[in-house]
Amino acid sequence: MRKITTILAPIISICTLTISIVLFIQYNTLTRGHNTKLPHQDMDIRPDNLFGINVKLQDYSDEQINEILRDINELGFGWIRQSFELTPSGFNWQISDHIIRTAYENNINVIAVLTDTQLADQNPQFIQFVNNFTARYSSIVDVYQIGDEPNLQSSWGRNPSAIEYTNLLTNVYPIIHQLDSDAVVLTAGLAPNTETGPENISDIHYLRQLYDAGASDYFDAVAGKPYGFNFSPNDRRYNHNILNFSRHVLLREEMEKANDTHSLLWAT
């Protein structure tokens, strides 16, 4: 009996150690990206209502816009993300007036995506458009995004460049903050992809390039797009080559590598 006990004791110890290691790895995998401690003392304050929805309200009549925004409010959403695009023919202020005023009347905050059909060219007309938009709505709108998915050629208008996008932020960020002291300027929502260029650049790599270019002085928060694609929200793999919900954790870790622990990461 003593001999059996002597043999079993190390086996049990090894099994216990193995199980402990497996559970530890599993716990770290499941909680990676979860803040189990108090937030960093310098971290910006999160909005009270974290739920938002992407909309394209300019395609609807005033009556339809009224109904849609009432429904959004009743569903409990606190935000809409709406694009306002400058075109070669100009900009329809009447439509934007109605969208923003009606959102305000329904207690819905607006993430205003300011963009241009030729954004990469950084035309003076777009800079003036940002100035006019902020001056017009600064009492209602406080969250702005400049462009959308600039890490894709199809969105940027040519091969994407983090340096060019940083230059754009450098031009518009001071204007927005001068006109709206409460403004929060988000980076454009970065499109999740695994490419390395030149046509498209991974959102992870592009964010790293933004920090390298000094863009962090010209945005207040980072915006990603947590698309799960073909994977379940329970997929906890963290891999630059996998497009799942956990990719948002990799974006946050990229921010921390750049010592940006105070900026929030928005899901847009």
Image (spheres, rainbow, N blue to C red):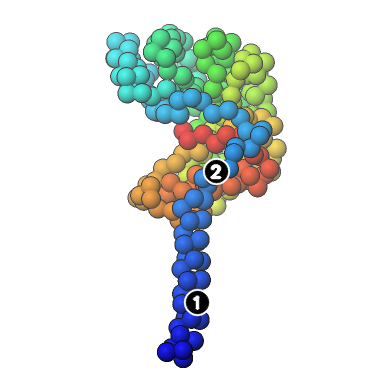
Amino acid type at image mark 2: Asn
Which residue ends up furthest to the front in the rendered image? 1
Q: Residues within 10 Å of mark 1 (few under 14, many from 20)?
A: few
Question: In x, y percent, where is residue 70?
Answer: 32, 15
Residue 14, disc: 1
Instruction: Answer with mark 2 or mark 1, whichever residue precedes in sequence.
Output: 1
For mark 2, give the secondary structure: loop
Question: In x, y percent, where is residue 252?
Answer: 56, 43
Q: Is residue 232 above or below residue 188?
A: below
Residue beneath the point at 46% across and 59% down:
26
Q: Which residue is mark 2?
A: 35
Residue beneath the point at 46% across and 33% down:
268
* Distance between the alpha carbons at the discs numbered 2 and 1: 32 Å
Q: Is residue 180 above or below residue 3?
A: above
Residue 104 visible in the snapshot: yes
Q: Which residue is more in the foreground, 229 or 246?
A: 246
Question: In x, y percent, where is residue 125?
Answer: 59, 18
Closer to us: mark 2 or mark 1?
1
Question: In x, y percent, where is residue 58?
Answer: 38, 18
Res 59 quadrant in image: top left
